[in-house]
Structure formats: C-alpha cells, structure tokens
Amino acid sequence: MSADGMLWSAEAALERAFLEALRADAEVQSLLGSPARIFVAETDQAAFPHAILERHECADRSASGVAGQAHTLTLAVRSRDGGRADVKDILGALRAAGEAAVLSLAGQRVVLIQTVYSDAMRTPDLREFRGLLRIRIITEEVA
C-alpha cells in the first residue's frame, strides 16, 4: 500500500473512532437520542436535532523524524425546536465528549484533542438554528 493509501486509511480510522466516542457519550445521547443522531453525510431523513460531520481536513505535522498529522473535524448541528440554547447545549456536549475521548488507533497515538471553533446561528430561512464545532486532533505514527 502506498504512503498516501496509509494516510487515507489512518484518516478513516480516526474519523470512525472519534464519531463512535461521540455517539457513546451519555450527555450527547441525552440531547441527540440513543443511538445519537450523528451522521457522516447530509440526509433529509434525519430527525431534529442532529449533527453531521461536514468536513475532515488533514495536514502533515511531522517533526523531529516523527510522522504526524493534524486533523480538523467540522461538525454541524441542526435544531428546529430548542432554538439557540438547544444548539449551544449540543455543541457543549459534543465538545466535552470530543475533548475527553480516548481514541485507540492502530499505528497512531493521539497527542492532542482541542476545540478550535464553536458558533451558533439562525439559518437564513429562519426555521432552524445551526451550530458549528471544529475540533483539531493531532496524531503521531507509532512503530
């Protein structure tokens, strides 16, 4: 397998492990249902509120002879009934669960999980509130 193929595999593994950790969190489940409504693609069938993984960016962060990556995951929250307060509660639960996550990844070690951005706003159609949460995860390859 090429180095590029291994990177994509590592990205997919990190994404799966991170989303599983969020879905397993009791506070997240209390707000997004059980199983938690956290999706990896847009869906018209989702009940409100729900969260969608909108983006997963990955950049090289190798240093001192150790290969590493910086992953930035962007989650979007959508709510209709609870307003801005509901979205902020969900963002807070996702943030806490994400930062507390213990991710077990083959060939990788998580160095840092950090929230870098959070915001809540009304959508232009005035029917929903939308929240955004960006979390950075720094990983290093281990032998």
Image (cartoon, helix red, strand yellow):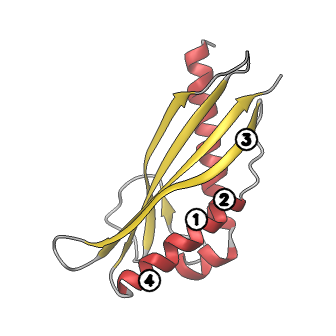
- How far, Cα to Cα, is label 3 from label 2? 12 Å
* Mark 2 burial class by Cα count in 10 Å: few <14, some 14-19, many 20+: some
Q: Nearer the viewer, residue 125 or 65?
A: 65
Residue beneath disc 1: 95
**Residue that extends furthest to the front in the rendered view of this protein:** 64
Q: What residue do we see at 51% from left, 79% from top?
A: 89
* Discs 1, 2 touching: Cβ within 8 Å: yes
Q: Residue at x 65, y 65 (%)?
A: 97
Which label sits in the foreground, 4 or 2?
Answer: 2
Is 18 rendered above or below residue 70?
Answer: below
| Label 3 environment density (alpha carbons within 10 Å; few <14, some 14–19, many ≥20) | few
Question: The disc labelled 4 sits on which kind of residue?
Answer: Asp
Left/right of residue 52 with respect to residue 11 in the rendered view: left
Residue 71, by quadrant, is top right
Q: Residues within 10 Å of mark 1 (few under 14, many from 20)?
A: many
Q: Nearer the viewer, mark 4 or mark 3?
A: 3
Sequence-wise first label, 4 or 1 = 4
Q: Give, as a three-letter code, the residue at label 2.
A: Glu
**Residue under pointer 3:** 111
Residue at 39% x, 66% y: name it: 119
Tell me: 49 left or right of 1.
left
* Type of amino acid at the residue the image marks with label 3: Val
* Alpha-carbon span between mark 4 and mark 1: 14 Å
What is the x, y in percent for residue 44? 31, 65
